[in-house]
Amino acid sequence: MRLRNDPNAKSTIQENKDLVLEMENTDQIIFSELFQNTGPIHLEIGMGKGDFLIETAIQNPDINFLGIEKALPVIAIALKKINDLDFKPKNIKLIWGNMEKLFDKLPLNSIDKIYLNFSDPWPKKKHIKRRLTFDNFLINYQKILILKKGTLQIKTDNNDLYFYSLNNLKRHNWVINYYTTDIYSQNDIFLKNNIATEYEIKFRNKNKNINAILSKVPI
Ligand SMILES: C[S@@+](CC[C@H](N)C(=O)[O-])C[C@H]1O[C@@H](n2cnc3c(N)ncnc32)[C@H](O)[C@@H]1O
């Protein structure tokens, strides 16, 4: 996602310390302190400008949502969107930084659900390790997700990333609860609770099929 540099983005982060953590200045995250409650935790990795995270959090006030995004101008836009709401939801927190550095800071067995929405596809074979469903990421997701019941939900326009992810999840013994190459096909059950992301809307408008996978940690 390329955005023109926003000279105020860093100060936007610093002015919103109640809402956003900086990866570099964060040690261990204690969710009960972060959210001031002990509710379930959902994590969106690569949340972009936050449309999905914000809408999902508004619709699910009893769930705590943590979004991570590495691009500073992008997360600054998400912050602005949250601040512009009439009623600022207490169940959203953001973290600015690279998700690769997040795993050591999260408690094991603590997250109910992880969302990967329209992750960068990294189509070249030499970049396979950067795909967010590459082996080491799946192993880390498994560690932070709640034992036996934590779930990973993936949506992508990229067919190759979809098939790669499906195969790699199976190879790592994840339970595949649901998969489709087209959530918008007639009567798809996934659509009933679907909240479209910014990229999803863009691809839908170009009539691109939207793939999805819902999987659960290996038992
Ligand atoms: C293609 S955009 C999708 C944005 C949003 N999820 C959506 O569906 O509209 C991918 C986003 O993931 C972020 N991203 C990619 N790799 C990341 C990483 N390692 N850590 C944190 N964010 C990352 C990018 O900066 C970008 O904003």
Image (cartoon, rainbow, N blue to C red):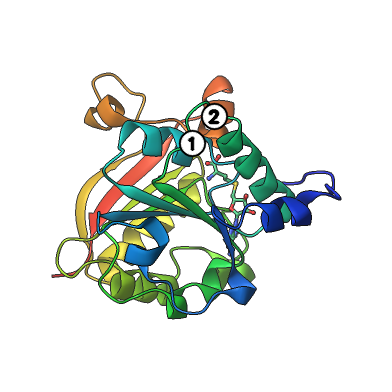
Q: Percent from the top left, x then y, of residue 199?
A: 56, 35
Q: Is residue 106 above or below residue 191?
A: below
**How dense is the environment of label 1, judged by Cα within 10 Å: few (below 14), some, or many (20 and up)?**
few
Specify whether residue 158 is in view: yes
**How dense is the environment of label 2, judged by Cα within 10 Å: few (below 14), some, or many (20 and up)?**
few
Q: Is residue 142 above or below residue 7?
A: below
- In the foreground, 57 or 189: 57
Q: Is residue 196 left or right of residue 1?
A: left
Q: Is residue 180 left or right of residue 12?
A: left
Q: Is residue 168 above or below residue 213?
A: below
Q: Percent from the top left, x then y, of residue 219?
A: 13, 70
Residue type at mark 2: give it.
Answer: Leu
- In the foreground, 75 or 138: 75
- In the foreground, 208 or 64: 64
Specify whether residue 71 is in view: no
Q: Residue at x 64, y 60 (%)?
A: 70
**Residue beneath label 1, please?**
88
Q: Residue at x 39, y 31 (%)?
A: 195
Q: Which mark is residue 85?
A: 2
Q: Percent from the top left, x then y, of residue 143?
A: 30, 76
